[in-house]
Amino acid sequence: MNPNGRKILIVDDNLKFADIMVQILENQGFQVSMASNGNMGIEKVSSENPELVLLDLKLPDIPGEEVLKKIKEIKKDIGVIIVTGFGGEQTAVDMMRKGATDFLSKPVESETLLRAVQNTLKMRDAQREDEQRKGYSSLENFFPFLAHEIRNPLHAISGALAIIERKSDLNDKFLAQSVKIIQEEVKHLNEFVQECLNFVRPPTKSRLTEVEINEVISIAINIISHMFEGFIEKIKISTAFDPKLPKIYIDYQDIMRVLLNIIKNAFEAMEGGGECIIKTALKSNFNSDSIGIVFIDNGAGIKKENLKNLFQPFFTTKVRGNGLGLAICKRIIVERHHGKIHIESEENKGTTVTIELPIHQDIDTAGVR
Ligand code: ADP
Ligand code: MG
């Protein structure tokens, strides 16, 4: 997240303390403004439109709770971090139920302050993205709605967890483990939400860039190898790249997602060990040329009766799978890049996934469904 120019308002009557916070935040590039009482704070939320407010609970004119309520009425999606003095924690927690995203106890260390500010802004960014995706049909409509409904409580959980982390003795092994489990599960859910949104992402023409596909595949292999660090020794991965491939125009992020999904599936199918080969070649069709990429693994393979379901959203045979990987691949390859994807497999022998990407993308229509 780039802090440059993002507006933060500090509402606090302790000017010395507020000044320190201003300096810490301005050093990072934030644009900071101050209000020394509640009414001025409310006024500045209207006139300056900040993204985030650091709100002191004890103000000379009106209580912090009232300020929170008023500024949320003015700007629903504003981030509010409560800053409390000694003994104000209970009220701060109550205020998190009313829309505050986090709370900090004075004195606040600069690192804690920055982390809280960044977390809150990140949540706001994600929420804003969800809002922008509204307006598509069926799944396209449902996923952003779902994302919003899941992300809101997830943010609250993350915020509350951050407080537990700061306040508790994480030398206690069981407590530390439990915190870690919650963090991982929150991450898992966040990723699921992100996958749902990737599936319905509105296409954008402007994202096409010229790439060497062999290079992109090498990067994907590297990323997956890191993800599977634990048992990568048992898996051999090799490549047979055609060195003479022409460059192609693709949406880099989309195609990277496809490569990661396919290689990840291959690795997951070879948990006991195995071999994966990735080949590229130029394919000349009668009316157009394309680049063929073939992924061959000798993992668990796929049951015959499942072959027809592979590209259905949510079809999965894995305990922790979400079944969106191949559905997204198909959407990206076929609908957004006018290519092809094909899977052959035999149970207990292995799987071959083939994709084809046309060399000449029609830039005007690529990506438009
Ligand atoms: P997920 O990986 O979350 O299950 P995917 O859409 O990526 O979802 O894959 C759907 C299903 O296709 C998997 O659950 C698995 O049964 C099957 N599959 C995909 N790729 C492979 C592979 N390389 N080897 C074996 N099965 C595979
Ligand atoms: Mg998958």
Image: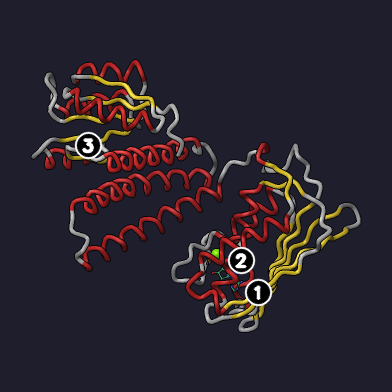
Residue drawn where x is 17% and y is 37% of the image: 106
User: Do the numbered discs 1 and 2 sit on residues whose CB atoms are within 8 Å?
Assistant: yes
Name the one closer to the observer, 318 or 253.
Answer: 253
Taking 316 as reference, is 157 left or right? left
Q: Is residue 352 visible?
A: no
Q: Residue at x 62, y 50 (%)?
A: 254
Which residue extends farthest left?
Answer: 87
- Using the image, tell me which numbered label, if any, was put on residue 5: none
Q: How many marks?
A: 3
Q: Is residue 344 visible?
A: yes
Amino acid, disc 3: Lys
Q: Is residue 318 above or below residue 2?
A: below
Q: Amino acid at mark 2?
A: Ile
For disc 3, the marked residue is: 98
Residue ID for mark 1: 276
- Residue 95: x, y in percent? 19, 37
Q: Nearer the viewer, residue 89 or 233?
A: 233
SS category of the residue bearing label 2: helix
Q: Residue at x 64, y 79 (%)?
A: 298
State which tag comes first along the sequence, 3 or 1.
3
Which of the pair 308/117 is nearer the observer?
117
Q: Residue 27: where, in percent of width, then height?
A: 37, 31
Q: Is residue 306 above or below residue 115?
A: below
- Looking at the figure, which quarter contains the N terminus? top left
Mark 2 — residue? 263
Viewed as shown, does residue 198 lie left or right of 237?
A: left
Per the model, the C-alpha gap separating discs 1 and 2 is 9 Å
Characterize the local packing of mark 2: few (<14), some (14-19) or many (20 or more) Cα atoms within 10 angstroms: many
